Image (spheres, coloured by chain):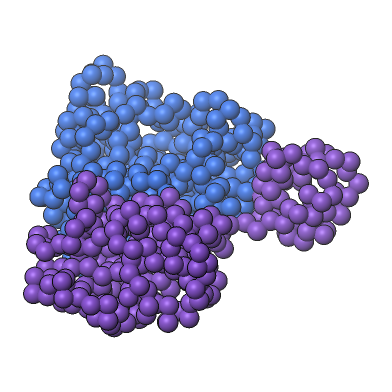
């Protein structure tokens, strides 16, 4: 199981509650502009209602997480649909911003554990349910923002149907929302889990290069540091001797400066 | 190998196109998503080709412009004019050296269903260069045959070229899906060109590509039906024992193929535009082919002149043992 944590954005406290319990999350940074929770598998932020709030909360969470990129981002919440029954869970295959007509298509690289559907983000509570879509108020703020922080395959939107033509959104209480979320928690957890696995796979493909011992021994400029990193990453792939940092360092021990070190590494790569 | 497609994006403009409907019928369980222009899905930034390769979607689209273009310099198998057209983008195979990984942000397959517009464009090109022999390459942005059971490419394009005998069609492939070709009469102006790398490279670098022996079997069958064959040793791959590898590959290939069916043999060293290489390296930093020693000259990444010459000279000489020089076409990539 990967150790990559997912970042979850929810609008309401009642939506957050079941997730906080399930993932055993603890509140962090009570002074911040948004309520934030953290655990081993997930960090979560409660954004408040609406596109702008979801985008702002995602940006805040990204900053709090030291702007580390390529992490899973999941927007979870409730929404209305004209025909799906209350409690149905869907994964967005298309996110439409109703006001502007802008559309995003979250790519999916795993078998979805739940059905997929269009999600349409509106600015006012929807009562018409005109199209075959889940109507809600955050996804179109969340998606384009978080797709700047991670590759799109790691950004997903999960919605639980809460209302429709036969069940007015006006009657929804916090308790009812939490209950709906709880009823589909396994599905939500499954999506989070699969997205984390994909992020884990991606992380495994990235070269792990220990440059620190090299930087301690010689002085490298910023450009030279970049080159060092790249050369060491490539050498590790083509020459097993470079997977042992001490042995690799020993081979360069007598060299006077960074320029000579880089020249030697280049030679090693070409030999 | 038939891909399992679980998601199909359909451009609104082609949702009623008979070819799109026929393709959709082949994937009744696939999720269908309507989209405006295919670029909204395919060209979005922040996509990961490597991840998408695990579960590529199919995009059914319409191509409006640039349907038939002059082929890049050095890309040719004759003295005439060279053009290429792409009814499809991306490929079901996963060759680690493939430049498509560096060219496109998405690994989804795009199928342009408006073949009639390709025909118009190719016809106009043939008319424009009426005094010259024109070659049209179909497998530049995809493998021409690998998805033929879905695209119906052969069934549509081969008869079209039969009606235009002054124009040549090259169907470039690593696939053994030759049923549609076998079902047609061979035409004199079509070359079915198969690409090969040595067995070791096939094992290490060509995920999903049918084994060499099966490709050769397919070629023999096509030769028996009267089709012209092409051999494409492209890219030529360098390595400590490249001589041994290519010698063995050529022996295998020419022990099976009837040389009189060969229209052309071309070969070209592994080269990439620099920005494609950078993108591919970022996707596959763990791939020795991309991490190994390569030379950047201007906007091109290659093995470097010396190694390229070694490869080219050796292969030229070896190939000369089997086939006449007149049908050799080294791919001269401009410096
Ligand atoms: S068969 Fe050709 S197009 Fe397909 S992945 Fe390999 S090199 Fe690329």
Quadrant including the C terminus of chain B:
top right
Residue with the most extreme top position: B131
Residue drawn at x 58%, y 52% as measured from the top left: B285
Residue with the most extreme front position: A31
In the picture, one chain is blue; tell me its letter. Answer: B
Asked if one can make out residue B37 in the rendered structure from this viewpoint, the answer is yes
**From the viewer's perspective, is B150 left or right of A71?**
left
Chain A's shade in the image?
A: purple
Residue A197 percent coordinates (x, y): 47, 69
Residue B121 percent coordinates (x, y): 21, 29
Residue B222 percent coordinates (x, y): 32, 49
Residue drawn at x 71%, y 50% as measured from the top left: A232
Is residue B202 or residue B5 the one in the foreground?
A: B5
Residue A54 percent coordinates (x, y): 35, 58
Residue drawn at x 34%, y 23% as measured from the top left: B81
**From the viewer's perspective, is A138 left or right of A70?**
left
Total labels: the figure holds 0
Quadrant including the N terminus of chain B:
bottom left
**From the viewer's perspective, is A243 left or right of B29?**
right
Is residue B107 or residue A166 the one in the foreground?
A: A166
In which image quadrant can residue B176 be found?
Answer: bottom left
**From the viewer's perspective, is A235 left or right of A14?**
right
Question: Height in image: B241 above or below B70?
Answer: below
Asked if one can make out residue B147 in the rendered structure from this viewpoint, the answer is no
Question: Height in image: B100 above or below B274?
Answer: below
Is residue A50 or residue A32 the one in the foreground?
A: A32
In which image quadrant can residue A34 be found?
Answer: bottom left
């Amino acid at each position: 199981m990967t150790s990559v944590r997912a970042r979850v954005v929810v609008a309401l406290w009642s939506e957050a509650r079941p997730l906080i319990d399930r993932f055993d999350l603890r509140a962090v940074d009570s002074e911040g502009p948004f309520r934030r929770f953290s655990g081993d598998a997930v960090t979560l932020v409660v954004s408040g209602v609406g596109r702008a709030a979801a985008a702002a909360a995602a940006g805040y969470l990204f900053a709090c997480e030291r702007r580390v990129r390529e992490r899973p981002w999941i927007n979870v919440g409730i929404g209305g649909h004209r025909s799906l029954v209350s409690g149905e869970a869907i994964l967005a295959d298309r996110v439409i911003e109703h006001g502007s007509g802008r559309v995003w298509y979250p790519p999916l690289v795993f078998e979805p554990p739940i059905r997929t559907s269009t999600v349409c983000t509106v600015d006012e509570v929807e009562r018409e349910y005109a199209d075959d879509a889940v109507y809600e108020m955050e996804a179109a703020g969340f998606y384009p923002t978080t797709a700047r922080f991670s590759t799109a395959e790691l950004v997903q939107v999960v919605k639980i149907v809460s209302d429709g033509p036969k069940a007015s959104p006006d009657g929804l209480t916090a308790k009812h929302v939490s209950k709906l979320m709880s009823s589909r928690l396994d599905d939500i957890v499954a999506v989070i889990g699969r997205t984390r696995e994909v992020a884990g796979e991606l992380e495994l493909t990235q070269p792990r290069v220990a440059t620190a011992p090299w930087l301690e021994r010689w002085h490298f400029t910023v450009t030279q540091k970049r080159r060092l990193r790249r050369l060491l990453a490539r050498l590790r792939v083509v020459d097993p001797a470079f997977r042992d940092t001490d042995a690799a360092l020993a081979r360069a021990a007598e060299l006077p400066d960074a320029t000579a070190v880089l020249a030697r590494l280049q030679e090693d790569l070409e030999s | 190998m038939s891909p399992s497609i679980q998601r199909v994006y359909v451009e609104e403009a082609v949702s009623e196109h008979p070819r799109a409907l026929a393709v959709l019928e082949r994937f009744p369980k696939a999720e269908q998503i309507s989209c405006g222009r295919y670029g909204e899905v395919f060209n979005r930034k922040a996509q990961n080709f490597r991840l998408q390769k695990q579960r590529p979607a199919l995009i059914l689209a319409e191509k409006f412009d640039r349907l038939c273009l002059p082929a890049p310099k050095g890309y040719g198998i004759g003295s005439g004019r060279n053009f290429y057209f792409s009814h499809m983008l991306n490929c079901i195979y996963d060759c680690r050296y493939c430049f498509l990984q560096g060219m496109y942000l998405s690994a989804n397959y795009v199928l342009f269903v408006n073949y009639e517009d390709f025909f118009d464009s190719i016809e106009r090109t043939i008319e424009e260069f009426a005094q010259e022999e024109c070659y049209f390459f179909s497998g530049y942005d995809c493998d021409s045959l690998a998805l033929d059971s879905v695209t119906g490419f052969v069934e549509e394009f081969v008869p079209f070229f039969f009606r235009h005998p002054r124009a040549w069609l090259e169907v470039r492939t690593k696939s053994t899906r030759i049923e549609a070709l076998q079902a047609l009469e061979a035409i004199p102006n079509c070359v079915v060109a198969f690409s090969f790398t040595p067995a070791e490279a096939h094992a290490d670098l060509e995920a999903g590509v049918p084994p060499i022996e099966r490709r050769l079997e397919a070629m023999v069958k096509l030769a028996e039906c009267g089709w012209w064959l092409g051999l494409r040793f492209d890219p030529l791959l360098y390595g400590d024992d490249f001589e041994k590898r290519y010698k063995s590959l050529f022996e295998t290939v020419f022990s099976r193929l009837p040389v009189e069916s060969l229209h052309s043999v071309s070969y070209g060293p592994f080269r990439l535009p620099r920005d494609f290489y950078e993108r591919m390296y970022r996707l596959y930093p763990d791939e020795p082919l991309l991490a190994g020693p390569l030379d950047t000259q201007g906007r091109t990444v290659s093995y470097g002149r010396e190694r390229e010459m070694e490869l080219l000279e050796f292969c030229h000489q070896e190939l000369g043992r089997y086939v006449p020089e007149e049908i050799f076409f080294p791919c001269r990539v401009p410096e």
